[in-house]
Image (cartoon, coloured by chain):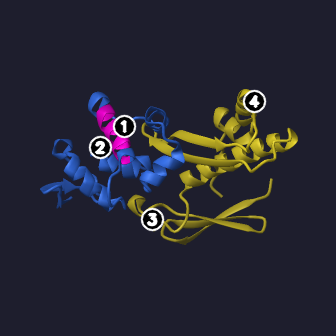
Chain colours: A blue, B yellow
Amino acid sequence: MEKKEFGGKLIEIDEDGFIQDPDAWDQAVAADLAKTEGVDSMTDDHWKVVNYLREYYLEYNMAPMIRKLCKQTGFKLKEIYDLFPSGPAKGACKVAGLPKPTGCV
Amino acid sequence: MDLITVTRKSGLLFEFKVREHTVASDMSVSDGGTGAAPSPAELIAGSLGACVAMAVQSYCDSNGYTDGDVSVSLTFEFADDPKRVGVIAVDVELPDGVPEERQQEIRDVIAGAPIPETFNHKPNVDVEFA
């Protein structure tokens, strides 16, 4: 684990850049996390995805299924990947301050 | 069915050969590999996508929907307990001119294609040590 500055705060992140303390997240943190995902400037579409992920996570303590994310935001799979090239799990969830999704190992 | 042979190249990078074709597979860096090739899970998802695309393309060709090609986008998520691919989300883009009322028929075609059916009927994986 290491600490890096996001949104003007020193925040602990794991080796893949996911923040470890969900309470440390705010929009300024999200904007800086987005830069690590190749998103220089968050658009309304980016925020639509991030805000939905965040609201869902705060209510259910888990990330939504990808299809639910698509349906609720109105974006197709390709459009989600256009917004977050690393994808909904590794990219958008990271920017939204959610925990890292389960991987293959 | 032709024999498929799998050999190690380095680390977790393996190649499998079937007939004159060679396909590599590796794990991502975060999963202990080098990311030099699709992971086994990505190959499974890609295989599903290819099978779906072929099935839908055949349907469209047979029914005269030839204004454009079928394309498929997909992604997947892992699940735990046991570790497995838990969800595969598939978006299918149809050629122009396919009536909406044909979509259920196309869904049936997809569901009946060999790889989706393989997922539905869980093949017997029979392992021996050679």
- Given residues B51 and A104, the one toward you in this image is B51
Q: Earlier in the sequence, mark 4 or mark 3?
A: 3
Amino acid found under the numbered disc labelled 1: Ala
Task: Say whether mark 3 and mark 4 are on the same chain.
Answer: yes
Q: Residues within 10 Å of mark 3 (few under 14, many from 20)?
A: some
Chain bearing tag 1 is A
Q: Amino acid at mark 3?
A: Gly
Q: CA distance from mark 3 to mark 1?
A: 26 Å
CB under 8 Å between discs 1 and 2: yes
**Residue drawn at (64%, 51%), measured in percent from left and top?**
B128
Regarding mark 1 in the picture, which secondary structure is present there?
loop
Q: Residues within 10 Å of mark 1 (few under 14, many from 20)?
A: many
* The label number, if any, that marks residue A63 in the structure image: 1
Q: Is residue B37 magenta?
A: no
Give, as a single range, the part of the protein colored magenta.
A46-57
Disc 1 and disc 2 on one polypeptide chain: yes
For residue B102, the mark is 4
Asked if disc 2 and disc 3 are in contact, CB closer than 8 Å, the reply is: no
Q: Indicate which label's residue lies in the foreground, 1 or 4.
A: 4
| SS of the residue under disc 3 | loop
Badge 4 local density, few (<14 within 10 Å), some, or many (20+)?
few
Q: Is residue A8 above or below residue A25?
A: below
Residue furthest out toward the bottom: B10
Q: Position of residue B72 (x, y in %)?
A: 64, 47
Q: Label 2: which residue? A: A98
